[in-house]
Image (tube, rainbow, N blue to C red):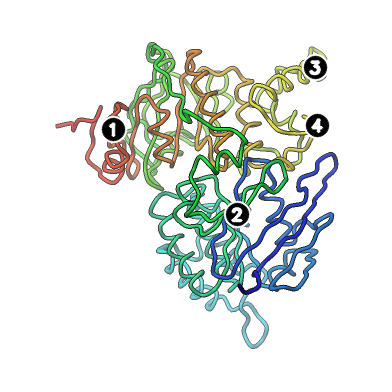
Amino acid sequence: MSQPLLKAEGIVKVFPGVRALDGVEFELRAGEVHALLGENGAGKSTLSKCFIGIHQPTSGRILLEGKPVEFTNTRQAMDAGISMIHQELSPVWTRPIMENVWLGREPRTKLGLVDHKKMYDDTKKLLASIDMHDDPRTLMSQLTVAKIQMIEITKAVSYNSKLIIMDEPTSSLMDREVDQLFRIIRELTAKGIGIIYVSHKMAEIFKISDRLTVLRDGTYVGTRETKDTQLSDIINMMVGRDLKDMYSKGSHQKGEAMLEVKDLSSGRVFSGVSFTARRGEILGFAGLMGAGRSEVMETIFGVRQRTSGQVYLNGKPAVINNTRDAIKHGLAMLTEDRRRTGIFPVLTVKYNMVSARFSHYLNKLGLLKNREIERDCLAFKESVDIRTPSIEQKIQFLSGGNQQKVLVAKWLLTEPDVLILDEPTRGIDVGAKSEIYKLMEKLAGQGKCILMVSSELPEVLGMSDRIVVMHEGRVTGILDNTPDLTEETVMTYATQSQKVESGKEVL
């Protein structure tokens, strides 16, 4: 067998108070898709960042095509042929697509000036290769998370790398975009390019990977051929236990209507949206990219301006002009993009958790009630199972899944009646997903009303009592989640414009 494209031997990485990696082994062959798996905090992203030069191993060594390498920055790694699609998107929001794609390597004219025409033409070709037809001059701030994700993928491919690390590349993509990504991956591996594929979506792992390596608590568990491995084997390697009944949707009693939305519209984004959500109900929202689901939630929560329609809470009109009004009315919203609109990266876990209820922790003199903050944060750290050395740790140093749990705790601290969860398990491992599902079911059992937006149909079907399906800004179906409801049925409504209610066409 020829030498590996990339090999890691005994990698150790120590941060203050945390041993993130402890003797990790890894090997990638040319032309291979090698899945890197593990729970949040297992060390997947840390190992990937060691490969790309963001982190330097405390000990151990990395070999690229048989030669030891020590990258002190990402430029060195990119020059050596390694690129990475990061889980947390961080484009330059105020600049156009084409400048983001070619940032730091802009094409030049003979006079040394930036060749904007070539940049435009090259970007247009790259976008066309993934079936995107947006104007390369469009600002990144005007794009959806899914489109930004596809552009990041395009950017990584444009480096002509020997090796591409993909960290949760499909976390915000729908099936069509995932198929496009897999087509790109197969084209790359056919050229001998190696892919390290980090994902929590097991169906994707079995579909695209050749081998898989599992990490647990920063240590190496093992490597297996994907075709010879069962899902139960992977889960057991990842969490050290079997996970039964992943979706814990119960059959508790649903109460009266808590939230009513009537003919809600926001410009040209969506129009005429109506639905009712009851006490103790998990109401799922399904649809393709651009269907308008997140925008509806933002409008209900006061982030986005409504142009018509009304929101009712407990039968009474609710005046919600901003997020402060929403919180006062007992609403809470976990946003789709935790890095951009969720966490405060430079603040501690503690202050992120209390950020939506900060005034509650001020005494009459305007001083913080530190003991009360400490008590509440420690209680929610345990109940939501946030893995951090301390609530004084800056949230930017937590794994993506643990950041998500902090945000869940943050909103639960506001004691909401209606909880909006937009992609609640995006970037979360199977163990943490199971915990989030149990927490959702517990909250519904306590009489909370939950609106859940998800791009994962198994999740929508597994957790929802009813499902609102949207297509191009309109509701096309409100379906009872009966045992015979299938993904194919939901997708039918997600791709048509004819309106239905409760699974029946409106004549």
For disc 4, the neighbor class at 10 Å (few under 14, some 14 to 19, many from 20) is few
Relative placement, left or right, of 171 versus 353 is left
Q: Please, what is the three-letter code of the amino acid marked with disc 2?
A: Trp
User: Where residue 227 appears, x then y in whole percent?
Assistant: 47, 55
Q: Please, what is the three-letter code of the amino acid marked with disc 3?
A: Lys
- Find numbered disc 4 in the image and state the secondary structure of the residue it sits on: loop
Residue mark closest to the camera, 4 vs 3: 4
Residue mark closest to the camera, 4 vs 2: 4
Q: Residue at x 72, y 45 (%)?
A: 218
Residue underneath mark 3: 369
Query: Which dot marks residue 485?
Result: 1
Q: Please, what is the three-letter code of the amino acid marked with disc 4?
A: Glu
Nearer-N-terminus badge (3/2): 2
Nearer-N-terminus badge (1/3): 3
User: Hey, which quadrant is residue 158 in on the image?
Assistant: bottom right
Q: Report how far apart the C-alphas of labels 1 and 3 lie in the structure.
A: 50 Å
Residue underneath mark 4: 392
Nearer-N-terminus badge (4/3): 3
User: Where residue 306 appears, x then y in whole percent?
Assistant: 43, 34
Q: Report how far apart the C-alphas of labels 4 and 2 lie in the structure.
A: 30 Å
User: Where residue 18 appears, x then y in whole percent?
Assistant: 81, 41
- Find numbered disc 2 in the image and state the secondary structure of the residue it sits on: loop
Tell me if residue 133 can be seen.
no
Q: Residue at x 32, y 43 (%)?
A: 471
Q: Indicate whether 103 appears above or below 377.
A: below
Residue underneath mark 2: 93
For disc 3, the neighbor class at 10 Å (few under 14, some 14 to 19, many from 20) is few
